[in-house]
């Protein structure tokens, strides 16, 4: 931990060092500060050293500073505190939410009360939650699964959620006859909100499908075809499921335009933009 302290200033942990001497010319990175946050909280777990509070605050402050208005992150910050990139790397995009998720599961000092986890729906078993990339009619919109349905909820502050209702249910005569869940952040189109979701058959077969939600009232489903765009063998492992569904999305993306009858190709407002840019190029 002394080494980590030596490499950290009031901005964050330095990207590179020669032994214990920071290389200030090479600045800082978001992924390194995310990893440092995890290391600091793990150290507190075993040593109960309250001095860790200052380090944790520094790293979290850095992550907050590196987040862009659209929800993405810069990864590189120069020593003079200027951003050195436009879009962050895959490492920083993955490690930032990982580090924050890791931290909220630790019993940290009282001074770090901002890290306490708040359940959006106490007493309700839900999963597969995503928040729309922008407010709709001035409110945040959340999609999540309360088995077996895909549900929607609204919030003014991302803390208190209300107006929860079932958005889509499994269909007895279709490939999604057991349960369904959202498979990624909704994508804003000219015609509405495109939702890619996964469905499960009674035989535990996972498939990908799509639905179109009304642009100003996303609690309304405009179109939900029965087409199935990816079907895999029986899956018993969630990690395998995630990897195969992720790879299938590339194929699904190129079929989206053919789902809707339109005079001109639709305009995709990718959300989050880093995902689609990296995924399909």
Image (spheres, rainbow, N blue to C red):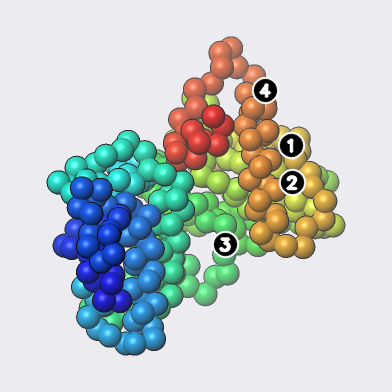
Residue 234 relative to residue 82: left or right: right
201 to 275, vertically: above or below: below
What's the residue at 50%, 52% (across, down)? Answer: 130
First in sequence: mark 3 vs mark 1: 3
Mark 2 → mark 1, Cα distance in angstroms? 7 Å
The residue at which mark 3 appears reads as 127
First in sequence: mark 4 vs mark 1: 1
Is residue 234 or residue 124 the one in the foreground?
Answer: 234
Mark 4 → mark 1, Cα distance in angstroms? 12 Å
Query: Can you tell which mark lies on residue 229?
Result: 1
The residue at which mark 2 appears reads as 207
**Residue 165 in sight here:** no
Residues at badges 4 and 1 in contact (C-beta under 8 Å)? no
**Residue 264 in sight here:** yes
Residue 18 relative to residue 269: left or right: left
Point out the image quarter for the N terminus.
bottom left
Which of the 4 image quarters holds residue 148? bottom right
Mark 4 → mark 2, Cα distance in angstroms? 18 Å
Residue 46, x across and y down, in percent: 39, 86
Residue 139, x across and y down, in percent: 36, 47
Looking at the rendered structure, the secondary structure element under dot 3 is: strand
Mark 2 → mark 3, Cα distance in angstroms? 18 Å
The residue at which mark 4 appears reads as 258
First in sequence: mark 2 vs mark 3: 3
Residue 261, x across and y down, in percent: 64, 19
36 to 157, vertically: above or below: below
First in sequence: mark 2 vs mark 1: 2
């Amino acid at each position: 931990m002394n080494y980590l302290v030596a490499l950290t200033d009031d901005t964050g942990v330095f990207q590179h060092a020669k032994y214990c001497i920071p290389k200030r010319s090479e600045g800082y990175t978001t992924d390194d500060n995310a990893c440092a946050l995890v290391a600091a909280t793990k150290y507190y777990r075993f040593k109960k050293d309250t001095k860790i509070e200052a380090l944790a605050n520094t790293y979290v402050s850095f992550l907050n500073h590196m987040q862009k208005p659209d929800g993405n992150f810069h990864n590189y910050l120069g020593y003079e505190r200027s951003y050195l990139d436009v879009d962050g790397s895959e490492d920083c995009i993955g490690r930032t939410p990982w580090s924050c998720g890791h931290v909220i599961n630790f019993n940290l000092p009282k001074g770090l009360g901002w890290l306490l986890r708040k359940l959006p729906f106490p007493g309700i078993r839900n999963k597969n939650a995503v928040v729309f990339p922008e407010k709709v009619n001035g409110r945040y919109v959340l999609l999540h699964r309360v088995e077996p349905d895909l549900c929607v909820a609204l919030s003014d502050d991302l803390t208190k959620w209300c107006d929860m209702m079932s958005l889509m249910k499994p269909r007895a005569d279709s490939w999604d006859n057991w349960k369904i869940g959202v498979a990624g952040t909704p994508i804003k189109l000219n015609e509405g909100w495109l939702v890619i979701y996964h469905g499960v058959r009674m035989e535990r077969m996972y498939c990908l499908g799509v639905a179109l939600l009304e642009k100003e009232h996303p609690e309304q489903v405009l179109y939900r075809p029965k087409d199935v765009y990816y079907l895999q063998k029986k899956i018993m492992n969630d990690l395998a499921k995630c990897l195969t569904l992720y790879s299938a999305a590339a194929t699904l993306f190129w079929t989206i335009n053919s789902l809707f009858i339109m005079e001109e190709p639709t305009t995709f407002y990718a959300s989050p933009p880093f995902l689609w840019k990296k995924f399909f190029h």
